[in-house]
Image (tube, rainbow, N blue to C red):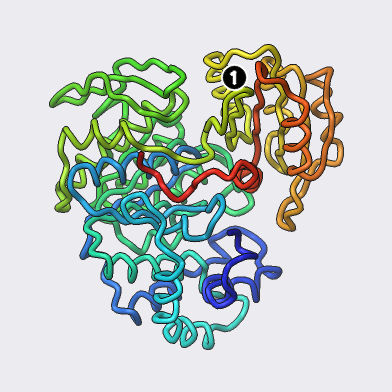
Amino acid sequence: MHQSQLPTFIQELVYGSYLKVADRLHGPDALTRDLSFAQDLFTALAIDWRRWPRVTITGSKGKGSTSALLASILQASGERVGLVSSPEMRSFNERIRIDGRCVSFELLEEVAQEIFPAVHSITSQIEPPNYLGPGGVILALAAKIFARSNVSALVVEAGRGGEYDEARLLQAPVSILTPIMLEHQDKLGATVQEIARTKAYISAPGSSIIMSPQTESVQSVVREVATQVGATILAVNKDIWVEEAQSNPDGVVCTIRSDERSYRDLHIPLAGLHQAENAATALLAAKTLQQAGANYTEEGVYEGLSRVRWPGRAQVLQQSPWVLVDGAINRESAQQICELVRHYPAKRITAVISVPKPKDLAGVCEEIARIADRIILTELPVPTLTWYEDAVHIASLSSPDVHSIIPAENAFRFVMDEVQADEGILLLGTQSFVGSALDFWNIDTCTLWK
């Protein structure tokens, strides 16, 4: 269920204020986002985030899988865990989960009715182009649902930023920074340093920043921000590190070591060696959250990591032919897919790619052409996405066999009709494309733990 399929009442509640001014919002988040309205909403609803041990997560990649790994560790250690993530793949209620499962739409609608008067009171007094952001309303819904459901710990994934993201208002005792790179430059900043700065400002005074492996320039910025806000940095490759990791068709087996002990033969059923570093990040965050009152056990680490799944991230949808879907929209992510595919023998590989502007279509095609015998370009009828008019030309610079089949659903039908059982299919593109693939293959996206 995508936004257009949401019950009208919930859609208006969450997105109404934003949509009224969306076409007038130009420029960076610093000029177009005001967190005071979300704070007013939390105050009106008597939401006190301090009741929960909580972690916020921001970064440019790996946020979703790191969130799932952390939430699973905490639950396996004895917590009842509320998880807030975005964007949804198939259904809006994927954004709010308890112990890995989506909350029901019945509960969502009931709580939406409860908070409506407070939302309406605030939005009716806002002067355009100001607005109450969807993220603030979603967090309010989540908080009320979690309070009703006796949740005992929170994992909250921020949107694109940090300093101007409503998740910052949680003042979390632990914040995670997954790898940061150039993205959303019109909203977050022109350089990776500017982007790192706005993301790092999600951290609260006196908190711990759990930093995934970063470039030196990003590390330098994070250190500056930590000093300014009075936060402490704990870093992968310094306070915890991946000692060894091996990738196989079932995921990753790794050893993670800290100063206190070594976690040997950890099994992570997520594809790609980078998941070992995501697991190290999640493990360090879970351990640090003990200081805020959360449970953490070594048994929980092993159990939590071994059962997690994250739909749409290097996920195999079927066998014979194998079909693998991933949200790769840049060169580095495509390189990781190339490394992963060596575990999946195939007589021939067809790649279906859907990468809009300004993402790195050329980089994705150049890398994927190393392993794919054929590239099919496709698009989605999504108003917010703009496509490369010369996409076929761009892909043809890397591959001799390029086709265009639009829309994505037609491309899916074509490859499933035409590809043989001993071949392979790669589906790579933006989150909307991944969601459409999960829809086509009818993949469960509401259950994260096995």
Q: Secondary structure at mark 1?
A: helix
| 250 with respect to 284 (left or right) | right
User: Looking at the image, which is closer to me, 234 or 229?
Assistant: 234
Quadrant, the N terminus: bottom right
User: Looking at the image, which is closer to me, 53 or 169?
Assistant: 53
> Where does label 1 land, which residue?
338
* Type of amino acid under label 1: Cys
Crowding at dot 1, Cα within 10 Å, few <14 / some 14-19 / many 20+, comes out as: some
| 258 with respect to 282 (left or right) | left
Q: Give how far across and how far down residue 132 sits, in percent.
A: 51, 74
Residue at coordinates 41% horizontally, 76% vertically from top-left? 110
Q: Quadrant of residue 252?
A: top left
Q: Quadrant of residue 65?
A: top left
Question: Visible in this render: residue 214?
Answer: yes
Residue at coordinates 64% horizontally, 23% vertically from top-left? 321
Quadrant, the C terminus: top left
Above or below 436: residue 21: below
Above or below 115: residue 87: above
| 285 with respect to 67 (left or right) | left
Residue at coordinates 46% horizontally, 27% vertically from top-left? 271
Residue at coordinates 41% horizontally, 51% vertically from top-left? 157
Above or below 416: residue 76: below
Above or below 437: residue 240: above
| 242 with respect to 292 (left or right) | right
Question: Visible in this render: residue 190?
Answer: no
Q: Give how far across and how far down residue 184 sits, in percent.
A: 60, 48
What is the total number of numbered labels drawn onto the structure image? Answer: 1
Q: Give how far across and how far down residue 117 sits, in percent.
A: 44, 86
Q: Give how far across and how far down residue 53 sits, in percent.
A: 22, 55
